[in-house]
Amino acid sequence: MNRKNDAVHVEKKEQDDYSSQPVDESLPTTPLVVFFALFIALGGWLLNFDLTYSGTVLQMSTFRSSFGTCIQEHGESSLVCSITALQQSLTNISSLFIGLGAALSGLLGSWLGRRTCIQLGCLIQAVGAAGSMGTAGNYVAYVACKCITGVGLGLLYASTLPYGIEFMPPRRRGAMIALFNIGLSLGSNCIGVICLGSSSLKSNWAWKIPIICEIPVAAVYGTFIMLYPESPRWLVLHGRDEAAVEAFLSMYKGHMTRGKAEAIVASVKQNIESYLDMASSTTWTEIFRRHYFPRMLTAALVLIASIICGTFFVHTYVALFFGQLKVSQNPFVLNCIIEACSFPGACAGPFIAEGLGRRRAQLAGYAMLGSLMLIAGIVNTCLGSQNTTGLIVLITLLCLWSAIAAAFVTSTAWLLASELHSVRLRTYGQAFVMGVSFIFQFANNFYLPYMLNPRYGNMGVNITYFFFGISAAALVIVFFLVPETGLLSLKQLDNQWSAGQRAWQTSLRKNRTISARGQEFGLGLANE
């Protein structure tokens, strides 16, 4: 390929990540860019809205009567309906299909474009949600429709954030990810409030109303995305340089000259060509070789720990948990309270990740999360789950857990998982880690109902001891394996690993010095 001679100069450290360098630092944050970022955050809202609904709806009496078995127990004047632990577990099989959709997004996104892939995801999600409306009495059909919805969510999830990042100035990309995380948090909050309101209905509309809410939001999202141009990176990849120039001019209307837009497109093209040259000499099997596998394993452990440390227990199954404890308070009210506490944590997350550092945020987060779960278990052991004081303490601790997890753990886990891969193998490594994380997410959501179910694990509040153990193990893993990645370019991180620097020897302070001086670990050592 011929390279353009008028490509703008891009700092070396900004050229390392070939997938996200289309916009330079001098671009302003226009009102259109702000609305675009908010629009991208709506994709996070859709994802968590559906995931949280899958667990919260299990506590609705009308859902159990529609899909479960109803019997008249001794001493009861009315029928008592319940669904089996297997049914409770299978409702989250859609996690596997979210992973499938995310994998398909790579192929479809390259063929159709980011914007069209997002629209397709919205369409599939809406079809799956609409199908769920007509499945009353047929649980297999309900789960099948949830799987269809999962494919749509996977397409949406894997396409939305990259689409947004490719338009944002580098100094604003952290804010973009922050808004997406806030969208995730708001999705959980909204479904909690809607389920609280609809749970009082005595018909199947109690569990159908939350599903209905997804359809218009998906329709609006898929329609209004046409207000924004196609990804300039995708346009350049398909040889449509002039269309990429027009995309930048449209997004930064009145704040960018044609010459500047052409220079940025030339830089994007140069980076893409460099990446393709690198990819031509790379095979996916290299991620399992000795020199790279520890990095990929570390990235996978970071994501898996954030999934199984109690996140889905607190956000997805907490209503079911309180329902099976048979507390006097409405489980849906308690669910809303706990979900609401994650919002301020999500807002604080980006500041903690940049100010405290990824590694220290994870260490502090797991230390606090484990302590809260241990205290909850001890209080339950001493006072019992039906004690009013013990219940208040439990709810308070879960509220704190929700806020701290959002601020310290989940906000940094995704950053670390993407930053730990090498430049050359990043695409393959990240795809593998994402696939593994979705498998563990399904496994986590499969065994949790069995642990809570009175006929099986019947752990009740004692499940907090289990999550204490997971948090303690995660703390050890982070201390010994996870280095500080903040402020370093991907090439500098490559050199850090090549130099054999131990994780506990890294810090944000050292990284700040390296970044400021333009130095790299392992100077003179060959890169991968």
Image (spheres, grey):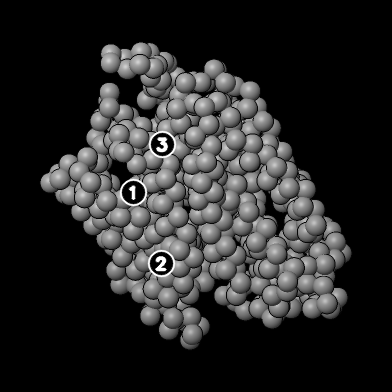
Q: Residue at the spot x=50%, y=54% of the render? A: 185
Q: CA distance from mark 2 to mark 1?
A: 17 Å
Q: Residues within 10 Å of mark 2 (few under 14, many from 20)?
A: many
Q: Which amino acid does the dot numbered 2 rest on?
A: Arg
Mark found first going from the N terminus, 2 or 1: 1
Q: Which residue is mark 2?
A: 358
Q: Which amino acid does the dot numbered 1 rest on?
A: Cys
In the rendering, at what x and y percent does residue 471 appear? 28, 52
Q: Which amino acid does the dot numbered 3 rest on?
A: Asn
Mark found first going from the N terminus, 3 or 2: 2
Q: Which residue is mark 3?
A: 445
Q: Can residue 255 be seen?
A: yes
Q: Secondary structure at mark 2?
A: helix
Are discs 3 and 2 less than 8 Å apart at CB? no
Between 225 and 345, the one nearer to me in the picture: 345
In the displayed structure image, the side of residue 100 where residue 387 appears, left or right: left
Q: CA distance from mark 3 to mark 2?
A: 26 Å
Residue 34, picture quadrant = bottom right
Mark found first going from the N terminus, 3 or 1: 1
In the rendering, at what x and y percent does residue 489 appear? 52, 72
Q: Residues within 10 Å of mark 1 (few under 14, many from 20)?
A: many
Between 185 and 86, the one nearer to me in the picture: 185
In the displayed structure image, the side of residue 381 where residue 160 appears, left or right: right
Q: Secondary structure at mark 3?
A: helix
Between 371 and 357, the one nearer to me in the picture: 371
Q: Which residue is mark 1?
A: 309
In the rendering, at what x and y percent does residue 191 appear? 53, 44
Are discs 2 and 1 less than 8 Å apart at CB? no
